[in-house]
Image (cartoon, grey):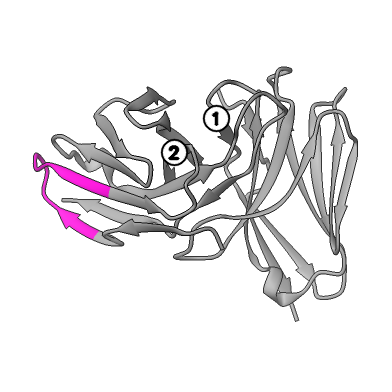
Amino acid sequence: DQQVKQNSPSLSVQEGRISILNCDYTNSMFDYFLWYKKYPAEGPTFLISISSIKDKNEDGRFTVFLNKSAKHLSLHIVPSQPGDSAVYFCAASAGNAGNMLTFGGGTRLMVKP
Amino acid sequence: DAGITQSPRHKVTETGTPVTLRCHQTENHRYMYWYRQDPGHGLRLIHYSYGVKDTDKGEVSDGYSVSRSKTEDFLLTLESATSSQTSVYFCAISARTSGGAGDTQYFGPGTRLTVL
């Protein structure tokens, strides 16, 4: 049973428009959420995170929104650029001793010039 | 970029042979992790370490063992490789110290393992 789900395997967006990537979770103990970006043949790169005490965190073109009641988070990229084309993973942590992360299955974002 | 290297980067082996993957960090971080990435599953935790000689199991630990004899090195061993262990393996490190909501993990470049 997947505790973190990214229901859209792929997303195509025009350059300059907004990209919205979604993530749902089931474990109410998750208290820290992260987004990673992954290019082919490379390791995941940390993008942005949010603690459960917040509902929004912004870093340049990237904003993460957290809706705890709906157990839903989203990543907004504005404006989207061709270099943003990659696979995006959301991940969650329950603040356990090992800081283990549970990952979603990923969404492939394609930004068209 | 976090100083994490993995070796080898690519490996092809045969079913039943032992395989060891190495993760090396230069950040002196306490926590190290091994994940595998498979289509549709994202990344799944195999084992992690919270200090020298201190390790624990993750979600998909069957068929894998780990060792950490030095802070900078974390080894993943497949005692007898099977085709189901064909995957891309990622090492990660974290500076998590104590308590708190969590800490960011930084990933190495990955090892692509094929078991024939």
Q: How many marks?
A: 2
Q: Quadrant of the N terminus of chain A?
A: top right
Image side of residue A101 versus residue B80, left or right: right
In the rendered image, is residue B41 in sight? no
What residue sits 82% from the left and 29% below the top?
A52
Amino acid type for the residue under numbered disc 1: Met
Q: Is residue A100 above or below residue B5?
A: above
Which secondary structure lies at badge 1?
loop
Query: Which of the 4 image quadrants contains residue A23?
Result: top right
Residue B33's label in the rendered image is 2
Q: Quadrant of the C terminus of chain A?
A: bottom right
Image side of residue A113 versus residue B49, left or right: right
Which residues are the magenta region? B11-21
Amino acid type for the residue under numbered disc 2: Tyr
What residue sits 41% from the left and 31% below the top?
B51
- On the image, the x and y values in percent for residue B70 come to 31, 40
> Which residue is labeled 1 in the image?
A100
Callout 1: 10 Å neighbours few (<14), some, many (20+)? Answer: many
Which secondary structure lies at badge 2?
strand
